[in-house]
Amino acid sequence: MSTLETEPSRLERRTAMSAPPARRIPILSSLGRLLRLTRIEIFKLFVHKFFVITLALTLLVTVGLGFAGKKFSEDSQVFRFSNYGVWVTTAGFGLQVATILLVAQAAMSLSGEATARTLNTVLCRPLRRIEFVGAKILSLVFATVVLVALTCLAAFVVGGTIEPRAAPDRMMLLSEEAPKPKPHIPLTTYGPIVDPRYPDKEIAPMGEVVGSILFGFLLLVVPVLAAVSVGFLLGTLMDSAAMAIGVAIGLFLALETSKFIPMFYEFLGSYAYNYPISQIFTLMRDAGNGGEPNWDAALAGVRVAALYVAGFFSVSIAIFCRRDVTL
């Protein structure tokens, strides 16, 4: 009786031992490794000093220029900067500095691994090359979004320290009895756009103006990523981090100076690197003055910039996956 009772259990154990293990879905496993590698790359951004210096310099330039514009506006008897004008203008200068440093960060993302002789060690692990380079790209996208948001927030806070007032009549400016602004510095003083001659007449509500400016900052992520993708491609092609950074920054500055050549800029049109950035900032300033921005031209430039991003990152992935990384 005991023999009959134990035979089925033995058969079940043998069947369970011989059964193949449950298969994992390859795409989900690869996606999990990609997310883990991306988390590691983002952590490395904050551990390494270069990205921290990038954050500090961007914040310093944005805040410094914002307070300089505020001081000039308070001391001048002719020019008066609005809150929205300081917000957009200082964010533009801060974003230029951030983009240069982001291009350098992207250029040394892979070339720095080659210079430090760590690529072989990393690729000996059970991961695919496309996962490794994909994590690098996602970490750069994260860094770009963080810096654009930082410049937007810092310029918004500085612009909010300006006390708004209607532009007084010029004869009042020349009069000794002209009212002096109160020494009051609130955290934020944004409000609706009004006509200085008729303070009770609202030209544009605050929500509409702020929404248009925030939409512009959202669009700016794409052209900034276009510059970052060029730097990343150069870093993929070169083993020397110093050479990759130098070439990437030189190319970026050449693209920046091209906007001062009218013939070159007009010939390329929306295909020029500076086209969407200049269009977006122009529309953001227009919104800050109470206008109704038309985003059609800017969106056309953003779509072209998105093609640049997809193209340069795709070429970088293809080159790295086929590249001999024997060091």
Image (cartoon, grey):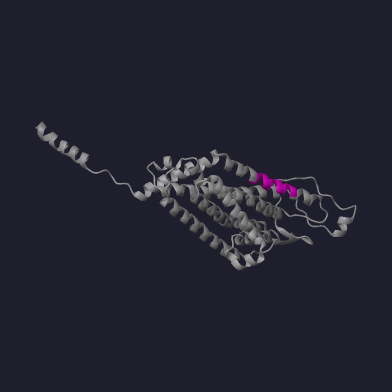
The residue positioned 43% from the left and 54% from the top of the image is: 318
The residue positioned 53% from the left and 42% from the top of the image is: 45
- The secondary structure that dominates the magenta segment is helix
In terms of image quadrants, where is residue 280? bottom right
Q: Residue furthest left?
A: 1
Q: Nearer the viewer, residue 221 or 50?
A: 50
Tally of numbered tags: 0
Residue 144 location (% of width, % of height)? 56, 50
Residue 173 location (% of width, % of height)? 86, 56
Q: Residue furthest top?
A: 2
Instruction: Look at the image and tell me in which quarter the C terminus lies.
Output: top left
In the image, residue 310 sits, relative to residue 51, either above or below, namely: below
Magenta stretch encompasses residue 179: no
Q: Nearer the viewer, residue 292 or 28?
A: 28
Magenta segment:
58-68
Q: Is residue 48 visible?
A: yes
Residue 165 location (% of width, % of height)? 77, 54
Q: Is residue 143 visible?
A: no
Magenta stretch encompasses residue 66: yes
Residue 107 location (% of width, % of height)? 54, 49
Q: Is residue 50 left or right of residue 39?
A: right
The residue positioned 85% from the left and 59% from the top of the image is: 170
Q: Nearer the viewer, residue 74 or 198?
A: 74
Instruction: Look at the image and tell me in which quarter the N terminus lies.
Output: top left
